Image (cartoon, helix red, strand yellow):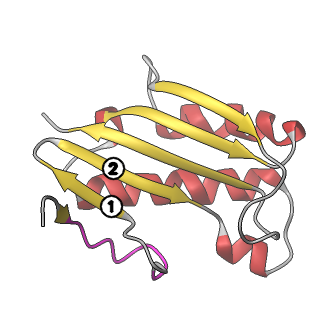
């Protein structure tokens, strides 16, 4: 295997993918979603954003880093009206300078009840 699988006990069990892989100093974090909120029927974007950013934090810390090591995030929203929640929660988990970011509005997540997903790339010191 060309990469190390990082176990992250704080994340829900993955399906046919790995939440976090590490290759040298690079860490790739699969898209994280707020499954507990979605399963409870909560469609408010704030709790989803908080959960997703907390999952990213758990993931990068399990790989031996911290949020300042994340250099790129890709954000997927199902509605542009969810973007203010990202703007509210991002500074609670990241300090300036913020990582490079892309934000896309998509038709749907694979699980229709999910409203946002964020993936990340980190480079450890």
Q: Is residue 120 left or right of residue 124?
A: right
Point out which mark residue 20 bears.
1
Q: Secondary structure at mark 2?
A: strand
Considering only vertical position in the picture, is 2 above or below 26?
below
Q: Quadrant of the C terminus?
A: top left
Disc 2 to disc 1, how far (Cα)? 6 Å
Q: Is residue 87 left or right of residue 73?
A: right
Q: Quadrant of the N terminus?
A: bottom left
State yes or no: residue 79 in magenta.
Answer: no
Q: Secondary structure at mark 1?
A: strand
Query: Which range of residues does the magenta coloring cover?
Result: 5-13
Dominant SS type (magenta): loop
| Residue depicted at 87% across the width and 44% down the height | 79
Q: Is residue 88 left or right of residue 5?
A: right
Q: For mark 2, what is the residue?
A: 28
Q: Are marks 2 and 1 in contact (CB under 8 Å)?
A: yes
Relative image position of residue 8 (x, y in whole percent) = 32, 71
Q: Residues within 10 Å of mark 2 (few under 14, many from 20)?
A: many
């Amino acid at each position: 295997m060309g990469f190390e699988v990082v176990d992250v006990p704080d994340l829900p069990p993955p399906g046919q993918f790995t939440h976090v892989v590490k290759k040298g100093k690079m860490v790739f974090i699969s898209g994280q979603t707020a499954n507990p909120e979605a399963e409870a029927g909560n469609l408010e974007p704030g709790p989803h954003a908080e959960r997703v950013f907390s999952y990213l934090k758990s993931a990068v810390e399990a790989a031996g880093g911290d949020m300042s090591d994340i250099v790129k995030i890709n954000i997927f929203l199902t509605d542009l009206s969810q973007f203010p929640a990202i703007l509210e929660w991002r500074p609670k988990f990241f300090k300036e300078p913020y990582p490079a970011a892309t934000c896309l509005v998509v038709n749907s997540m694979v699980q229709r009840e999910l409203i946002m997903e964020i993936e990340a790339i980190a480079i450890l010191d």
